[in-house]
Amino acid sequence: MIYRQDKINKNKIYKIIFLLFFVLVILTPFGNFLGKIAINIFSGAGAVSARAEALVENTELSLMSKKQLIEKIKVQEEEINRLSITENLYTELVVDYEKVVTLLDIKNQFSDLVLTEVVSSPSQNIYNTIIISKSFNVGSFVFSESGIPIGTIESSSDKNSTVLFFSHSGRETEAFLNNDTTPVTLVGKGSGNFTISLPREIEVKEGESVYLPGVKNPIAKVGFVEFDPRDPFQKVYLLSDQNVYKLDYVLVQSETKIEAEL
């Protein structure tokens, strides 16, 4: 009985203490202080939570922007590739157009020109000649695809012909300087190079053209002039506009009309 009574008394004491503490928290400044601490703790936790949410949202936006940027770069790369392809096609069309115009112009001069393939280039031949498909008359004139005179048929078989370049070392070809009445003799030096010898009183300028009789396109152009004050003649070096090492096709005159004019 005594133990039971003590337990009841303790419970009453705990209730009185709790009631006093509750009154203290609610009604005294100390209670207000504890309340502010609690509010700050909970508000701080809320701020941290809000900041975390904002960080996650910004990260998502940043990742989304990177994805969009990558997609935009891919689209731009595709557009650049498309424009590059278009530009290359345009360049090829321009080159083809110029070749066609040149070919038509040459065809107007020589209607009997035949397009034929080069089967052996000068790089494979030490004699400054090329071998072409088809058989042609010896002496027939040969032009590059761009219409530049490059040589004549030296020999012919049943299926192929050999072209000897005008620039063949030591070969002499009669021509005219700057398409006027000044005759010159071209001396081949190999690989599309020539020299001519002229009196010093004849003025020769770099870039001037040299023509074969009856041919509108120049065979070569003046590169530079060399002279010795003690020599009454000047030596002129010329170079063909056609790279003889890059010939895939040539135009061959099936009859030697030009020779008849020389």
Image: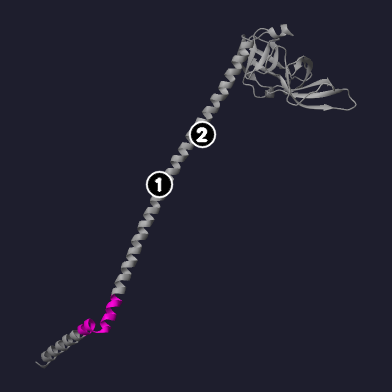
Q: Amino acid at mark 2?
A: Ser
Point 43% across, 40% down: residue: 75
Mark closest to the chain's N terminus, 1 or 2: 1
Residue 28 lies, in percent from the top left, at: 24, 84
Q: How much space separates mark 1 and mark 2, taking CA atoms? A: 24 Å
Task: Give the numbered dot on residue 9.
Answer: none
Quarter of the view holding residue 7: bottom left
Residue 230 lies, in percent from the top left, at: 90, 26
Point 33% across, 67% down: residue: 47
Residue 195 lies, in percent from the top left, at: 79, 22
Q: In the rendered image, which residue does mark 1 sit on?
A: 68
Q: In the rendered image, which residue does mark 2 sit on?
A: 84
Residue 259 located within the stretch drawn in magenta = no
Residue 260 lies, in percent from the top left, at: 72, 6
* Front position in the image: 169 or 62: 62
* Front position in the image: 175 or 150: 175
Tag count in the figure? 2
Q: Reply above or below: 28 against 191.
A: below
